[in-house]
Amino acid sequence: MSVQNKKTALLSTSLRMICTDYDGTLAEPENVPIAESFFQRLQSWRQHAQVSWVINTGRTFESLQEDLIRRKVPIWPNWVVSLEREVWLLRDRRGVGWYEWNHRCELLHAQLFESVGPLWKLIEDYIVHHTKAQLVEDAGSPLGIIASCEEEADEISAYMTPLLENWPTLIAVRNSIYFRFSHKFYHKGACLEAIANGLGILPLQIFVAGDHLNDLPMLERRYARHIGCPANAVDEVKKQVRAQGGYVASANVAEGTVEALDRLCPIPKPAI
């Protein structure tokens, strides 16, 4: 292989994007700082290459912004995916919505949610009369559900699965005991792919990490070649990460994410 070809191959395989879930993957439930090691590793990678950081979360953009300020993070992401479907470019810690993507996303969801009107009554009646779960307002969904425990969330999921088969483009997005509804073509993986395509970044140049069920759509090799999760990830995530040839860390939350990053994407040593 010629020197030029070697340089081209190295350029094409070098890490260019780190995409992480937020809660449970970087941030612990308590209002404590995110592990400093993550930001150290991110900074080290940026000294080696032009690496973008994407936070891919189910939170609203405003909620994430407030939490980043509260935890006093030293480095902010370049991009944010909020509500598992809105895309934001950050400039001076402020979000600039990716208009074409977000506008089309909003339009399709409005049409979908209106078209499945009879479904909401069925779900509401079931929640009210057969569970201890709460119906709550959700910024990205006609209704949100908070189950009383993981076991009840499993029961709710089992009830809704056959109902949703009548509306093939509608899905229930679950994160622990929380549910919201979404268009099946808008999820964390699709948003990651859209950002990467816009920046000209290939899947083999992307590291992705998540810990819960709503992260499953992005924990696939079609979106990222390097896939990891912290030790606190749910069993379904660990299973998928292993099936995709990824790495399940022994440490929790941000330390586990750093462990996976170091194992899958070690920073190249400088040439002598």
Image (tube, rainbow, N blue to C red):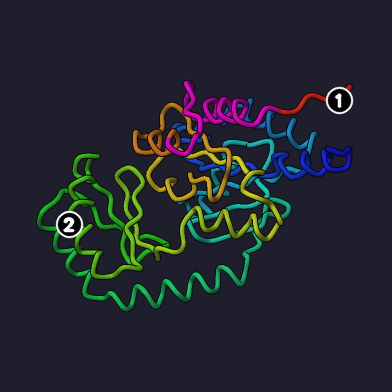
Spatial CA span between label 2 and label 1: 61 Å
Would you say 31 lies left or right of 119 here?
A: right
The C terminus lies in quadrant:
top right
Which amino acid does the dot numbered 1 rest on? Answer: Ala
Q: Is residue 265 magenta?
A: yes
Q: Quadrant of residue 109?
A: bottom left
Dot 2: element:
helix
Residue bearing the label numbered 1: 271
Would you say 77 lies left or right of 223 here?
A: right
Q: Name the disc covering residue 127, or none.
A: 2
Q: Which residue ends up furthest to the left in the rendered image?
A: 129
Span colored in magenta: 243-266
Would you say 211 lies left or right of 264 here?
A: left
Residue 97 pos. (x, y %): 62, 64
Residue 32 pos. (x, y %): 52, 30
Which is more toward the observer, 185 or 179? Answer: 185
The residue sitting at 50% across, 30% down in the picture is: 247
Which is more toward the observer, 251 or 200? Answer: 200
Which amino acid does the dot numbered 2 rest on? Answer: Ile
